Amino acid sequence: MSRILLSAVVVFFCFTLAGGNGYAREQKSRYVTLWYADREVLDEFNDNLRLNRKLRNSMRKKNVVTIADEVLAKADIIIEKVQIVLDMFPNKYHVRLVLLSNPDDVAAVYKKRYDKRVDYIAYYSLSEKTIYISADDASLRVLAHEVGHSVVDHFFKVRPPYNIHELMAQFAEKHVTD
Ligand SMILES: [Zn+2]
């Protein structure tokens, strides 16, 4: 194969890999790196994650073209709201948001990492700075709770005791709709 032809083939494959299925599975916003297994999970998550009217107003300012854009915009709005509710504004806040299909998938990820059986619909990994969430069970309150954990985690240099961490996440969950 000639060098020119080889480069052409390489370029073609790069294009195919980048644009093959028409969307990227990993996308970034100001606060979030979003990852999802497939389009179905993304759609399900977006349908279930409904903002209240107040938070929806902030959506108008966002540039939303794709479903992933919409999910990222919602996540950024919820994160900003939780920071206001908790009155904690960490300097370098960034999380990964991993969308899984259902609680079985959440349990599988948890089992692999911690070798323990759980029935969580979502959890925040302190060591990975990552929110894992079941698309089937997604809601404003569930995401606000996990975002609460992540904001607390980013804010304190010394990690608060578990019960305090949990109380603050519950506070975020409760007041995100205020
Ligand atoms: Zn919690």
Image: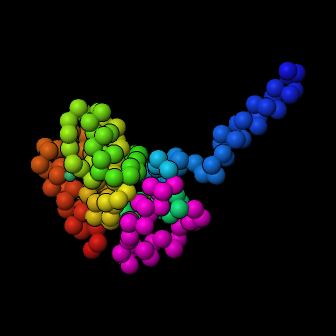
Of the pair 15 and 155, the residue shown nearer to us: 15
Coloration of the structure image: rainbow
Number of marks in picture: 0
Q: Quadrant of the C terminus?
A: bottom left
Task: Give the residue at x 32% y 64%.
Answer: 139
Q: Position of residue 43 (x, y in %)?
A: 47, 61
| Secondary structure mainly formed by the magenta segment | helix
Q: Is residue 124 visible?
A: no
Report if residue 60 lies within the magenta region.
yes
Question: In the picture, residue 110 is in which quadrant?
Answer: top left
Q: Identify the residue at the far bottom of this view.
A: 53
Q: Residue at x 52, y 71 (%)?
A: 61
- Asked if 22 appears above or below 45 in the picture, the reply is above
> Which range is magenta?
39-66
Residue 3 in the image: x percent, y percent? 85, 22
Left or right: where does residue 79 sit relative to residue 72?
left
| 164 horizontally vs 144: left or right | left
Name the residue at 70% across, 36% down: 14
Query: In which quadrant is the N terminus drawn?
Result: top right
In x, y percent, where is residue 46? 44, 63
* Residue 36 shows up from this direction: yes
Q: Nearer the viewer, residue 52 or 153?
A: 52
Residue 85 magenta-highlighted: no
Q: Position of residue 93 (x, y in %)?
A: 38, 48
Residue situated furthest front in the rendering: 104
Q: Residue at x 33, y 45 (%)?
A: 105
In the image, residue 178 above or below residue 152:
below
